[in-house]
Amino acid sequence: MTDLPEKLTCITGAGQSEVGRPSSRTALQLTADACLQAIADAGLKVSDIDGVATYPGKSAEGGGIAPVSPAEAAAVLGIDPRWILASGEGFSHMAPIFNAITAIACGLARHVVIFRTVAQATARLASRQSTLMAGERNARIEGNNAWTVPFNALSPINTFALYAQAYFDKYGATSEQLGAIAVNSRRNAAHNPNAIYRKPLSLEDYLASRVISSPLRLFDCDSHIDGSTAIVVSHRDAASDLRNPPLHIEAMGMAMGGLWVGKFAGDFTHLAADKAGAMLWSRTDLTPGDVDCAQIYDGFSIHVWLWLEALGMVGRGEAAAFVEGGRRIAIDGELPLNTGGGQLSAGRFHGYGHIHEATVQLWGRGGGRQVQDARTCLISNGGYGYGAMLLRRD
Amino acid sequence: MAPAPPPPPRKLPLLEPGSAFYWTSGAEGALRIQRCTACGTYQHPPFPHCAACGSEDVAPAAVSGKGRLATYTINYEPWIPGLPVPFVFGVVELAEQRELYVFTNVLAPVDQVRHGMAVAVTFEPHEDVWLPMFRPEDAPA
Ligand SMILES: [Zn+2]
């Protein structure tokens, strides 16, 4: 398996801007902050960077989900790129990373900076409806959203609540079990200075919070922020004498399907992410038992259950019992989970906070949330396009 | 007491060439779903060809309008001012075929909604659109 493209690449640096609700800095400033930090962290100069990529790029929508293009970032940073990419599709949030891996493996670039910038807190202050799926007032709904929005499913929570209810009904899962995700994230966030929610959250607090779209409650939802996160992915031949021990990209997996992507198959208790998990494990000799910690996508808490099963970390229908009580997923548990607070407590970076946290753990920077001797970290990302990576430090 | 203001208008679907039939079929009182003339498979959302056999000979076909509630959620959050809550957003598996799903509202008291309940279509007209919604099968139309 040594000729798989991800085996030729590694993560060499990581950075994160301040995270605000809102931030006083512009999206472009935040992007520069994160990218410059990541480049310096790797021990590289801006002139060493020859590739720039981002999810999803820039669009005219005003919700703050796509405020900075890679070309703008390159210009502001002073990068002269040989390779550049914005991708809002193709396995969703992780697509720029997978594309950077293949570009590096093909010789198109040596050191690629990949960033994710959001300005959703600023947009939300201007309009509470900025994060809804309804589009402009009075406009007709087009495309896949037309199948759900006319029924007043105005927020993504409505569609993912369908999964949570189906899972509850099929497996007899409970709110007490689902609440373990939010409680665990908040406990870890207390040790993450950049997390937006750090006040303790008990299971009682969770169960007392209001139901938004049953069975999902307020604390099952991630939160909009302003901020930027960046990583540097390098060719392994260019990584050995840099500042940090390289984080090998041991395996990657990707899939797309289901909601918002046409025909729907299944019974709403699992995702097309299953295929991403199978692909990942087919590309490594490591097994789920080798995972030291996991950063699992939590746009909504229910994603964590579905992803844990998709990745084979637990069997089908077992995720609820696995997380119940929170012992197994705590920092000193058998599978430390979302160690920086995840999106539920650290904010919605569309999975890039999870990737950043993986680097924190594998480079031993976790302080009070450090997993002892963490050598491998499993990362998953996405709610309709699915990506997963397994990182390994020698 | 002043009467309650009317709810905000629904966000209606754009009537696009490939799917307009779904939104207008209520005008004739029957739900229509795209069906392959060659192999008989239904599919939704509609596509330019049959995903099962590849035939482009696909056309809207009337269905019974009956099915079962595959999953649902009760939405309590008034996302826009005046949105009537709570309401039920759900997925109906139509009787004609396994995993033939449509997204919809279920017009039933929220405490009576159950996984697997039998439902039947009813249409709610808005402008040039008849939104296919579902009510418990044993409830009056
Ligand atoms: Zn056919």
Image (cartoon, coloured by chain):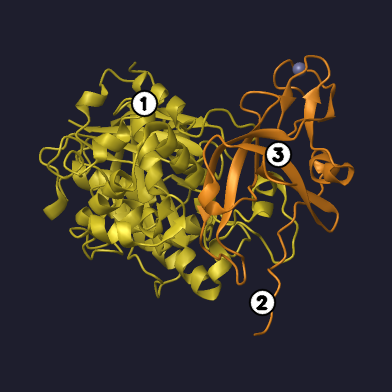
Q: Colour of chain B?
A: orange
* Local crowd size for mark 1, using a 10 Å CA cut-off: few (<14), some (14–19), many (≥20): some
Image position, residue A358 (x, y; %): 26, 43
Instruction: State the residue position of label 1.
Output: A316
Q: Where in the image, quadrant-wise, is ligand 1 located?
A: top right
Q: Are marks 3 and 2 on the same chain?
A: yes
Front residue (pair B118, B34): B118
Image position, residue A217 (x, y; %): 40, 56
Q: Are marks 1 and 2 on the same chain?
A: no
Q: Which numbered tag is attached to residue B101?
A: none
In percent of the image, x 39 and y 29: which residue is there? A310
Helix, strand or loop at mark 2: loop
**Residue type highlighted by circle 1:** Arg
Instruction: State the residue position of label 2.
Output: B4
Spatial distance from mark 1 to mark 3, Cα to Cα? 32 Å
Q: Colour of chain A?
A: yellow
Query: Dot 2 falls on which chain?
Result: B
* Local crowd size for mark 3, using a 10 Å CA cut-off: few (<14), some (14–19), many (≥20): many
The reply to whether residue B106 is visible in this rendering is yes
**Residue type highlighted by circle 3:** Ala
Query: Dot 3 falls on which chain?
Result: B
Image position, residue B140 (x, y; %): 72, 46
Spatial distance from mark 3 to mark 2, Cα to Cα? 30 Å
User: Which callout, 3 or 2, points at the residue further toward the start of the chain?
Assistant: 2
Left-right relation of A72 to A174: right
Left-right relation of B91 to A183: right
Front residue (pair B22, B64): B64
Instruction: State the residue position of label 3.
Output: B120
Helix, strand or loop at mark 3: strand
In percent of the image, x 43 and y 62: which residue is there? A224
